[in-house]
Amino acid sequence: MRRVVLPALAVVLAALAVYPTVASGYGVRAMLQLFMWVALAGSWNLISGLTGYVSFGHIAFFGAGAYATALAIARWHWPWPVAALAGGVAACLLALVIGYPCLRLKGPYFAISMLGLNEVLRALVSYFEGLTGGGSGLSLPTLEATIPIYYAMGAVAVAVTALAYAIITSRFGLRLMTIREDEVAAEAMGIDTARHKLAAFLLSAAGPGIVGGLFARDQGFIEPLSTFALVMTITMIVMVLFGGKGTVWGPVLGAVVLFVSQELVWARFPYVHQLLFGAIIVAVVLLMPRGVLGVLQQRYRLPRTI
């Protein structure tokens, strides 16, 4: 299978590399957004798909990265690539601080704690108006860097997918999936579940932090309501469920199909696109609860590295 997959990946990556030279401005921005969703869905999958700890507030890391990057650029005049990496570091530090208490919770308690984290961060950003601009938002200096950000966002999407492959094909990934199936049994087998969960949590926070930073630089303006939007977390969850959680390519497939479907539905039915998009999501989740790749793996016995 590698003889087919690797050449196909090389062709796809080469096509994406030259895409900005032939595409319209809308096409480049649409692909940039698709890269963003691939990275976000893949990052969510690293913790929730592999360990079973469902996060309803993963967009908190996106927002933390966005504001850290925006402050580094607007207040301290850092170059945007360095500032975006700093956004990833800020997200990891946040995950480290809240990881120890939150990962002790299980099931809906963990999900609710993550949702609460997102709301707390949004309130804090709104409160410290002198630093973050509060509800009025924070503006960044004007900069035309769509194509460089396109490549940077694409690199993050590729890195997150490659990281998922490296984890799933390793002993570390096998231990995470053991925790997902039965955490008590994993502890009885000698697996340090607390350390493994925290490591997966930190890795899952880095991608959204960097993506949030690139998003802030690309938009040139951020504000609390849109940066910490719960609907973004729901979207990444649905993308992973559609493609197949706990797989390498499931988040990529889910992001591509649902993003393209949303764009097509919006273009054809501008007044009812949200209703139709929601109906598509409900139908797919009900008919294929394991996701597209989960169904294919079960029916055709495909390897878990897919």
Image: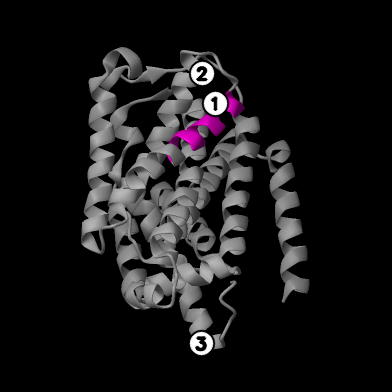
Q: Residues within 10 Å of mark 2 (few under 14, many from 20)?
A: many
Magenta run includes residue 88: yes
* Earlier-in-chain disc, 1 versus 2: 2
Q: Earlier in the sequence, mark 3 or mark 2?
A: 2
Task: Give me the C-alpha separation between circle 3 and circle 2.
Answer: 50 Å
Look at label 3 and name its amino acid: Arg
Circle 2 sits on which residue? 73
Report the magenta stretch's main SS.
helix
User: What residue type is disc 2 on?
Assistant: Ile
- In this view of the protein, which residue sits in the foreground, 292 or 45? 45
Say if mark 1 contacts mark 2, CB within 8 Å: yes
Question: Label 1: few (<14), some or many (≥20) within 10 Å?
Answer: many
Q: Which residues are magenta?
A: 80-91
Q: Is residue 99 above or below residue 300?
A: above
Between tags 3 and 1, which lies in front? 1
User: What x and y, as percent, mark residue 126?
Assistant: 25, 24
Q: Residue at x 23, y 38 (%)?
A: 119
Type of amino acid under label 1? Ala
User: What residue is pinned by disc 3?
Assistant: 299
Task: Give how far apart the Cα atoms at labels 1 and 2 are.
Answer: 7 Å
Q: Is residue 156 above or below residue 247?
A: above
Q: Is residue 201 above or below residue 286?
A: above
Percent position (x, y) of residue 204?
A: 46, 51
Identify the residue at image location x=46%, y=36%: 212
Distance (Cα) linking label 3 and label 1: 45 Å
Return the residue at label 1: 83
- The image quadrant that residue 146 belongs to is top right
Q: Position of residue 23 (x, y in %)?
A: 66, 40
Q: Work out whether 251 lies above or below 132.
A: below
